[in-house]
Amino acid sequence: MKISLSKIFAITAISTGILFAQTPLGGSANGDNLVRERAELNKAKADLEEARQKRDMEVAARWNDREKANQERELFNQKYEEAKDELDRLMEERVRLEENVRVAREDLAQVKENAEAKRSEFLALSADKSILEPLNQLKDHGIPYRLPQRIENFNRTEKNMALFRDDPLKVAKTVIDLAKKELAFTREMEWNKGELVFGNKVAFGDELRLGNIFAMRASSGADSSVALMLPSAGDKGRIFSWQEMNTAEPKAEVNAAFEMAKDSAFAMIPVDVLLSTTLSSELASAEEKSFFEICKETFKSGGILMCPIAALFVLGLLLVLERLIVLSIKGATLRYRKVLDLAREGKLEEAREKAKKLHGSVGRVIKTGILKDYPDRDSAEKALEEVFAGEVPALERGLSSISVMATTAPLIGLLGTVMGMIQLFQVITMHGTSDPKLLAGGISVALITTEAGLIVAIPLQFLHTFVSNRVDAIRSRMEKAGLAVLNSRWLKG
């Protein structure tokens, strides 16, 4: 607030008059002047105080205005940051939506391309006779039963495909009907009674067909005969014929199956699902083997790589056994708590006498901390660190070797599998894929080494984890015992 110069001069004059008035002057005129000047001075003071209050009010109003302006500025900045964040989010959303649109366009183009390809395939369906090939193979994979009727169905379907060339939908329906008939033939059971041919003679009996994999005949009477539809030996399953069962056991089983089927809803029938007479004879003549014989045969079938896998297993078990014995000795923790209690009570000599009887890693830590007199705690800690440096590597010795063996065994098994598959491909190149026994045998031999590697790796890995946990537990007890010894001697409470 501004104060006029006249008021300042008046205040100055009055102040000067007061100073002069303090000197003794005589007369009433001087007294009246003094009273008047004092009145003017009081008035000037009141004006000055009023002016000062107005100035303070204006200053307070100015600070209020400035504070409101700051608050408005902060609110504006906050709204600006929010708007900026929202704008950034909208920009990111826009980029994402643009990317989604681009991907959707690519997918749409791919779908259109696939639809066009499928449309072309659908239009060319009537001219593509190869779709009948999978159904036609069903006749060769099973027994040659009811072949004339099935061949007639295939020929009719081929004629319809040529006839309805301009109607792919009708062609597809015809192919689906043929597939249904073939699938139904492979799943149905047919049982007929009548005159049957057994070699050079004709007899009355029963004939049974189970889908596309098995058929058998059995004649009744005193001179009963039993015949099964099986592939001829040496023809790799391509030629089937009725083969009579001359031994008593198969004949009895087949006759029992026919009798059971007559009187019950369920029948146990011997079926050669692999259509292999060689495999059937091997299974029939197989004898029960002991566990040792099975292991010996498996080891022999696995090849040369079974030797290193077995060696890894034996060495791994020996290392684990050695580690368990060592850890059992070093992990002995009998009577060490009583030694620590005596040390805490200040009975150092008695604690030393008992500490001499301690064994194992924990006992060595306690003996190192109690039996010797150290000048200070730092010297004792260094001595304990030296003990730890010697004991921990001894505890962990051999763990890495066990881990390496557990990791190497499946890798060697995988190598054996690769070598076996290479040999299998060589067999396929020489003999083809017509004989399932060759393929199944080669694959089983190829997988034996992988199985052996996993059999070795899994228990070794579990044992390695178990031994590692034992080592960690002993190390933890050593640390606790060392800290307890130090506190018992240098931390008295």
Image (tube, helix red, strand yellow):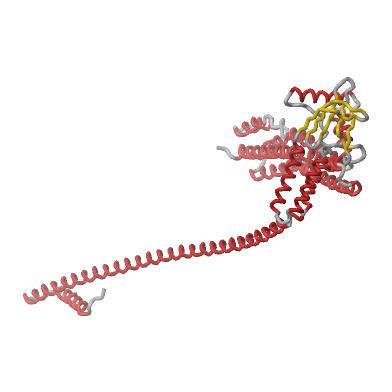
The C terminus: image quadrant: top right
| Residue 302 in view in this figure | no
Q: How far across and how far down the image is residue 469, in percent? A: 70, 38
In the image, residue 208 sits, relative to residue 312, either above or below, namely above
The N terminus: image quadrant: bottom left
Q: How many labels does the image show?
A: 0
The furthest residue to the left? 28
| Residue 130 in view in this figure | yes
Q: Which of 205 and 468 is in front in this view?
A: 205
Q: Quadrant of residue 246?
A: top right
The furthest residue to the front? 163
Q: How far across and how far down the image is residue 204, in percent? A: 85, 25
Q: From the viewer's perspective, is 283 left or right of 367?
A: right
Q: From the viewer's perspective, is 45 left or right of 68?
A: left
Q: Quadrant of residue 406?
A: top right
Q: Nearer the viewer, residue 197 or 328?
A: 197
Q: Quadrant of residue 309?
A: top right
Q: How far across and how far down the image is residue 75, in percent? A: 40, 64
Q: Nearer the viewer, residue 208 or 451?
A: 208
Q: How far across and how far down the image is residue 415, in percent? A: 84, 47
In the image, residue 352 sits, relative to residue 59, either above or below, namely above
Q: Which of 234 and 300 is in front in this view?
A: 234
Residue at horizontal 64 percent and vertical 31 percent from the top: 337
